[in-house]
Amino acid sequence: MKRIAVLGSTGSIGTNCLDVIRHHGDRMAAVGLTAGRQWRMLATQAEEFHPRRIAIADAGLRNAIPPSTFNGTEVLFGSEGVERIASDPDIDVVVAGIVGAAGLRGTWAAIEAGKTVGLANKETMVVAGPLVNALAARTGAQIIPVDSEHSAIHQALQAGAANEVRRVVLTASGGPFRGKRRNDLENVTPEMALAHPTWDMGRKITIDSATMMNKALEIIEAKWLFGLRDDQIGVVVHPQSVVHSFVEFVDGSVVAQLSPPDMRLPIQYAMTWPDRIDGVSPRLDWSKSWNLTFEPPDEDAFPALTLGRECAARGGSCGAVLNAANEVAVERFLAGDIAFLEIPQVCRAVLDSHDYDPAPGLSDLFRLDDWARQEARRWRA
């Protein structure tokens, strides 16, 4: 019986994770759940899964929730509560599903405690990849990626040794604007950008898919997760979202991971690793004809990719600044404060004006995160 903590249990990753646990109740149990503000949904989850502890990150809700809501389950508040669940010695696997830089502290606590971490929070590696890797090496923590692309790479890498890898290629669905030119995107509304053709995700991640900033961040994540050079990471647009990424080896062999677009598969893989068990995700139907297409991305229409490559090449403080600026830019776009094409412009301006640090410590990264957010809020075209 694997004892699981789900950080961000009310989000897209968290609810999919709980569905996997629901289907494998004889093998795994949700013993710790956390949420940001959605305490009513968290209460419903606690009633079904009976976790030992839950945490609500928004400490301001401490006095707003009726005491009888959680029927005796221990309730913690604030980031300290999330970190306590993440580091609980009775937990085997921590699924880090909190979106954005806010997820770093809980993930850090889990790695510091030597846990197996199912990492869905890509920002952890984008912001602090070298520090996270050094911490995991000290504590013996295992980091298993949950992003479908990085999970695919993790699986494909089993086919060869690290020195046999020529490059990895991340696949991108292309989002709702695949095939569009830059001038086609001038009047994009939030509703248009949120209409993803393949994946059902949270609002922030869906906008990142539309700008292809998600792929930019994944380039940086892949560098630190797999110990790659930035010139070993490519991107290709694959609208069917069946090939989730692939690895090319030095002899020319290419090993890919294929499955229907369903996040429960990489989530389950991370929770049961190194074993595989019967899955809850749908299967590919090989009795039908398939057409899988691949095309290069248009970096003029989607300049976020250029930003991602630059940050992967420079390292240091760049990932933290890019991520923070993007989070604020997405918020401003959804609020109608800036245009769709201005999201990467905000990121470029903040990135270019920051005081680059080639080897920041954790406190430096949190300081730069705050600074970048303030600069992104002030930005005007």
Image (cartoon, grey):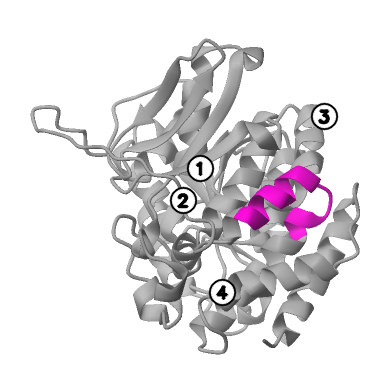
For the record, the magenta segment spans 306-320
Say whether residue 98 is left or right of residue 363: left
Sequence order check: which comes first, mark 1 or mark 2? Answer: 1
> How far is the residue under mark 1 from the one under mark 2?
7 Å
Residue that label 2 marks: 297
**Residue marked by disc 1:** 235
CA distance separating discs 4 and 2: 21 Å
Which of the two marks, 1 or 3, is nearer to us in this view? 1
Amino acid type, callout 1 = Val
Camera-near label (4 vs 2) is: 2
Residue 92 visible, this orientation: no
- Write the residue at 81% across / 42% down: 131
The amino acid type, in three-letter code, at marker 4 is: Val
Find numbered disc 4 in the image and state the secondary structure of the residue it sits on.
helix
| Amino acid type indicated by mark 2 | Pro
Residue at mark 3: 138
Q: State whether residue 11 appears in this view.
A: yes
Among the two numbered marks 4 and 1 on one chain, the one whose residue lies closer to the N terminus? 1
- Mark 2 Cα within 10 Å, few/some/many (few <14, many 20+)? some
Residue 316 in the figure: left or right of residue 123: right
Question: Whole-Å distance between the Cαs marked 4 and 3?
Answer: 36 Å
Q: Which three-letter amino acid code belongs to the residue tagged 3?
A: Arg
Q: Earlier in the sequence, mark 3 or mark 2?
A: 3
Instruction: For the residues labelled 4 and 1, say whether their Cβ atoms are less than 8 Å apart.
Output: no
Alpha carbon of mark 4 to alpha carbon of mark 1: how far?
Answer: 22 Å
Question: Considering depth in this image, is 48 or 146 the residue closer to the camera?
Answer: 146
Residue drawn at x 45%, y 14% is: 253
Which residue is pictured at 43% across the width and 40% down the height? Answer: 267
SS at circle 3:
helix
Residue at the disc numbered 4: 330
